[in-house]
């Protein structure tokens, strides 16, 4: 990633190389996925265990995001963080963001919350604490508790109705004049080839089948506005190259995407009605397309102040 990894670990059109049926089977296709596959699509909120390789993926995702944006947050809070603020990271995963922030801002207090306790339990900065909690039960904090509420890469873990509730909770626990910041990526890859668009279309349909909006990243500002408690909404976007054509950043992005799609192999092969071998062929074509088409993925941050 270009930055030293945190010590707190526990803190012209291309042609497919097989029958075109691999890419055409998703047309007008609706399938019901198994509950086991559903748990992967629905995010960590609905699963009981997370494999070690998923912890590694979440950490890689964090380092890639910091590398791309060159910082851990954009909200105008540096001064208050230096003097002492109360910060919440919702769905904190392995707690990498919190541990880095807590080290940089020792006068502030940081709380991480997640349903799966893969966060640090012993080796961690003294100004951090972590709670095991299901966010859909409501955040276990009084209103206006935090100066800064942060959440990253989890909008595809909630249905449309659930996301409205989650955004409302983020706003509720934020202090007046405090900030909320969301970090996400978009499912619409830029310059995707045939195989890439095939896999993305299948995944987007799987999300729709679970009432998860695959285009939700473009609507988060409206979700915040709908709370009627937010002002000064700022949106920034960066395109991240995928593959060796993008240098070190592209290699990291490809590695992170490979880990993510590995977790989605089962539901995608079921949906596309193809074998694991056929999916491997399809995915290999995706990887070739990344460099040939110069594919990239939008990454964005949105931050806003509570009235």
Image (tube, rainbow, N blue to C red):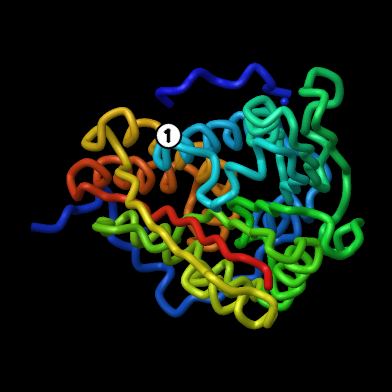
Which is nearer the eye, 231 or 256? 231
Drawn side of residue 12 relative to residue 191, left or right: left
SS of the residue under disc 1: helix
| Residue, disc 1 | 67
Relative to 1, does residue 254 appear above or below in the rendering? below
Which is nearer the eye, 238 or 117? 238
Q: Quadrant of the N terminus?
A: top left
Tell me where residue 93 appears, x and y as whole percent.
71, 40
Tell me where residue 200 appears, x and y as whole percent.
42, 60
Which is nearer the eye, 68 or 262? 68
Tell me where residue 3 appears, x and y as whole percent.
46, 22
For image coordinates 76% across by 73% down, the residue present is: 165
**Would you call the spot at circle 1 few (<14 residues within 10 Å), some (14-19), or many (20 or more)?**
some
Q: Quadrant of residue 139?
A: bottom right
Relative to 110, does residue 37 appear above or below in the rendering? below
For image coordinates 60% across by 51% down, the residue present is: 152
């Amino acid at each position: 990633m270009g930055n030293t990894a945190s010590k707190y670990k526990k803190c012209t059109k291309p042609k497919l190389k097989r029958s075109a049926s691999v890419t055409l089977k998703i047309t007008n296709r609706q399938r019901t996925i198994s509950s086991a596959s559903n748990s992967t699509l629905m995010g960590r909120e609905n699963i009981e265990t997370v494999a070690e390789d998923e912890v590694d993926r979440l950490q890689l995702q964090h380092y890639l995001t910091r590398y791309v944006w060159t910082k851990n947050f954009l909200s105008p809070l540096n001064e208050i963080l230096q003097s002492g603020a109360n910060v919440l990271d919702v769905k904190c995963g392995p707690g990498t963001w919190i541990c880095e922030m807590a080290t940089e801002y020792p006068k502030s207090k940081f709380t991480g919350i997640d349903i799966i306790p893969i966060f640090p339990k012993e080796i961690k900065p003294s100004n951090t604490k972590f709670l095991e909690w299901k966010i859909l039960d409501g955040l276990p904090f009084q209103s206006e508790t935090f100066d800064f509420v942060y959440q990253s890469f989890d909008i595809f873990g909630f249905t449309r109705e659930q996301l409205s509730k989650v955004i409302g909770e983020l706003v509720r626990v934020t202090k007046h004049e405090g900030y909320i910041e969301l970090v996400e990526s978009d499912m619409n890859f830029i310059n995707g080839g045939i195989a890439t668009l095939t896999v993305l279309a299948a995944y987007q349909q799987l999300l729709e089948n679970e009432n998860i909006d695959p285009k939700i990243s473009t609507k988060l500002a409206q979700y915040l506005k709908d709370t009627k408690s937010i002002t000064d909404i700022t949106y920034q976007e960066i395109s991240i190259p995928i593959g060796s054509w993008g240098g070190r950043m592209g290699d990291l992005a490809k590695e992170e995407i490979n880990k993510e799609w590995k977790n989605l192999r089962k539901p995608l092969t079921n949906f596309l009605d193809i074998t694991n071998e056929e999916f491997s062929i399809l995915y290999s074509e995706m990887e070739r397309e990344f460099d040939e088409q110069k594919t990239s993925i939008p990454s964005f941050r949105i931050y806003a102040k509570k009235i």
